[in-house]
Structures are given as structure tokens and as C-alpha cells.
Amino acid sequence: MSLYSGEGDPSESRAAERQGIAPSQPRVTFNRLELNRILNLYGRMVAEGEWRDYAIDFLKDQAVFSVYRRASEVPIYRIVKDPRLARKQGAYSVIGASGQILRRGHELDRVLLVIDRKLALV
């Protein structure tokens, strides 16, 4: 039984509360099209030898796809989906290794252009 569908057993959530376990909260995730676009870019950059590793984090308030040049380093890029900013600055952003927001917007394809262009010019 899944708590995400709303069809979960109410007694399970009450039992979790009695045991001191918080009921699971829905997480922000990338949908199939978003993940496909990100992984296509990742595959191209791996083929060019620019990137070597990645990590995906699905948090309560945002989803993060981190790209690494080497597995032991800090991520060189973080692609973040934050639905709370969807009506303001856009739900998607690309953050550099220094923590600076390189681009933010409403469409993932346009936000990812900052990575495509930067690596194509080098």
C-alpha cells in the first residue's frame, strides 16, 4: 500500500506516529521527460570526457542532479528543480561549483543551454 496514492491504510500512519516515526512525505522528483533530457546531456559530456559521475537527490522541497568531474570532488554543476519557485523565477536552475546560480528559468531545455554553450566554446 502506498501513502502517495492516498489509498494507504490509516492505521499504518497512526502506528508510525505512536512509534515516533514521521509519515513519509511526498518528494520532489524529475519526471521522465526531464530526466531523459538531463541524462542525454550527461551521456554526451561523458562521451567527450568532461564528466565522469553523477548523483540524484530527491528531497522534500527540491530535486537535485549533481554532476562530477571526478567522484571525489564537489559537483561542478547542480541541476535543481524547486517547484516553490515555479511562478516566480522558474522551477529550474543550474548552480556552479562555487554555489553561484548560472541560470534560472521556467523551461529545463533553456536552462541547460548554459552548460551546453559553456562546454562547446572551450
Image (cartoon, rainbow, N blue to C red):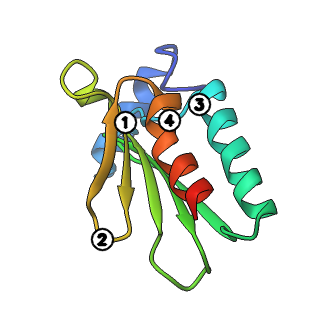
Q: CA distance from mark 3 to mark 4?
A: 9 Å
- The picture places residue 55, in percent across and down from the top left corner, at 57, 61
Q: Secondary structure at mark 1?
A: loop
Tell which tag, 4 or 1, sits nearer the viewer: 4
Tell which tag, 3 or 2, sits nearer the viewer: 2
Q: Residues within 10 Å of mark 2 (few under 14, many from 20)?
A: few
Q: Looking at numbered disc 2 in the image, what kind of residue is underneath it?
A: Ser
Q: CA distance from mark 2 to mark 1?
A: 30 Å
* Circle count: 4
For label 4, the residue is 29
Q: Compared with residue 61, is residue 2 higher up or lower down, i.e. above or below?
A: above
Tell which tag, 2 or 4, sits nearer the viewer: 2
> Which of the marked residues, 3 or 2, is nearer the chain's N terminus?
3
Q: CA distance from mark 2 to mark 4?
A: 24 Å
Answer whether labels 2 and 4 touch (C-beta < 8 Å).
no
Answer whether labels 3 and 2 touch (C-beta < 8 Å).
no
Q: CA distance from mark 3 to mark 2?
A: 24 Å
For label 1, the residue is 25
Residue 54: mark: none
* Residue farthest left in this picture: 88
Q: Residues within 10 Å of mark 4 (few under 14, many from 20)?
A: many
Q: Looking at numbered disc 3 in the image, what kind of residue is underneath it?
A: Glu
> Which of the marked residues, 3 or 1, is nearer the chain's N terminus?
1
Q: Looking at numbered disc 1 in the image, what kind of residue is underneath it?
A: Gln
Q: Quadrant of residue 80?
A: top left
Answer whether labels 4 and 1 touch (C-beta < 8 Å).
no
> Which of the marked residues, 2 or 4, is nearer the chain's N terminus?
4
- The picture places residue 63, in percent across and down from the top left corner, at 43, 43
For label 3, the residue is 34
